Image: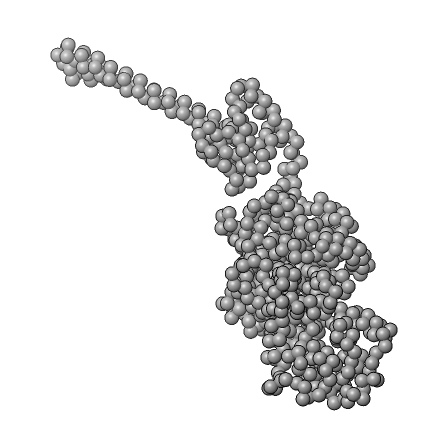
Amino acid sequence: YLELPVWQLRISEKLDRKRILLALSADQIRYGPRCLLPGENCASDSAELTLSVPNLQELVLDKRLRRNESVWVGVLAFLDEIPAEHRNGRFSFFEWGAVREPVALDIAKKFPNATVVSVAGDHPDVGLELLSKASRVLGNHSNVVTCSGVKLDRKLALKMYESPELARYSLLALEDLIPEKSHAYTALLKASMEETSGHLEVRKMVGALVLSSLTTFLPLPSILHVSLAMANVFGCDPSRTRASKPWTVTHDLLRFEARIVETMVSRPSSVGETTLIVTGSEALGGDSLFPPPVTRIDVINLTRYVHHHFDWARDGHKRTYALHIRENSTATLNIGSHLRGHHSLIEKESSFVAGGGTVRLTNLHTLRDFELPIGHHISAYHVLRVGLTRDEDGSYIPYDLIQSVTLIAALRMGLVPPQRKRAFLDFVNLPLYEDMAPWNVAFKGADLHYIDYDTRDETFDAHVGKVYRVLSVLMNYKRTIQDLEMCGPKAKNPYGFPYVSDCVKPSTHERSCTSSSAYPVPCDDGTCHTEYISCLRAIAWEERHRKKASQARAGRHATQTGISLNQTRLSALGQGSGVASQGRTITLK
């Protein structure tokens, strides 16, 4: 494929040389053009087409700006192809290594409800510069999350991979991700062909980022660009080609790109079978000879074992999950034909209820509605079920919208100081939920949201205002119990909070109460309670109940004894009178 020359392509229009040069990468331009269009005499034109160094530098600079535009055009074309896929613009978009040519602002401007995360790596000024541009273009409260100053390497990629974070879309800026003097694509190709430890690290880093997103866009030159580059280097002589059969775009291009992706993406760890679909921008069609240099990678089948949150080891959390991405083949079959062209579906509405909900899609052409359970997502004409299974209890947590990045992840990837301050201002204005740790708070669009699946349905604003007086109740109550010499050792509660479980350490069992935060206090009655006072009252009630039961039993015994004595006396009276039956009857009256 690399030696397939450009003369085999059918060119429907006359293209000027500069437009073709702009389609090439910087390294390809450096070789210098030799034969740009089919039918040209390479030898006679070679001197004429040689570029001077100043002009070459100017052209490369212009090329970088145009290349940024071409990547954005390619990404947008993929997003517009299936409107139902991006949920009316509600998605997360990670741009990894956005240093030279970020497209984050283009995404954020086009989709104001998206959450756009720009991770620039170890370039502190880049994040601030991008934030400044975002403020000018989108306003001070934009939907761009900018992170810089933290090295973007395999370690950071693995932290993303080992966390429940999941991007809906990612863009890998390869030239900023590959730490080599040579061109990024050259480095990746070397990494794909050589099994040295250094090259394997590159492949695992790329693999970790690709598998941390449902869809990844890779700005990889298409075979059309490579073919033109090879034609410029080796000339246009048809006899030099090694093609043994006619070449077709629909088959050979996709096979070429799939092979490149297959060789340069390595899974960081063994997670069972993983299925990817690779699509080149040539599949989008269009009249352009050179399609945007963007390749799309979709994860269709994946199991990823993850920890509680991003960089979990720093906080000591040990809870683990399995993140599953599975195709729902039945749903794919039912709605697949409605995802193309003017028959395309769009999301009509979503309804969320405790434990589930539905996503309703409508066909704008036929007005036919379809429903998918919460946690199902359309990706590359497939319907996927995405969610977490908690190892502790086997409970399932669906990914209803893939639209956010957690605050803890943004902070540890280098959230720039101005956005930290904005996050603080947004955070203190949120309603009060039970578990507002930074892994349960996330950027979603331009705002912060609380996302904990188990506790998001209840707020505590009305209760927190009484916390001082409630603590006073618990403290003073304990003092009286102590003076009555009825306060035992403190029982355990999950966080070790003071006053919550004082005085009531169970003496008859070792039960712990960690399954529900509403009942964290173990008690001698064998159940879990809200606080120690509830436990003391339960024990006191049992004591009173036992005492009353004992008294009742003693009363019944005394009554039965009295009746027996009376019957004995009556019997004796009857025997003495000689008319026992009559005497007994009279006495009973």
Counting from the top left corner in percent of width and height, residue 220 is at 68, 71
* Quadrant in the picture for residue 383: bottom right
Counting from the top left corner in percent of width and height, residue 434 is at 61, 42
Front-most of 571 and 304? 304
The quadrant the C terminus occupies is top left
- State the residue lying farthest toward the left: 578
- State the residue lying farthest toward the top: 576
Say whether residue 550 is visible.
Answer: yes
* Above or below, 372 relative to 482: below
Residue under the image location 71 percent in, 88 percent down = 237
- State the residue lying farthest toward the front: 196
Counting from the top left corner in percent of width and height, residue 370 is at 55, 66
Residue under the image location 37 percent in, 22 percent down = 550
Instruction: Determine whether, in the image, residue 465 is placed left or right of residue 337.
Output: right
* Above or below, 495 relative to 206: above
Residue under the image location 72 percent in, 53 percent down = 150
Front-most of 277 and 587? 277
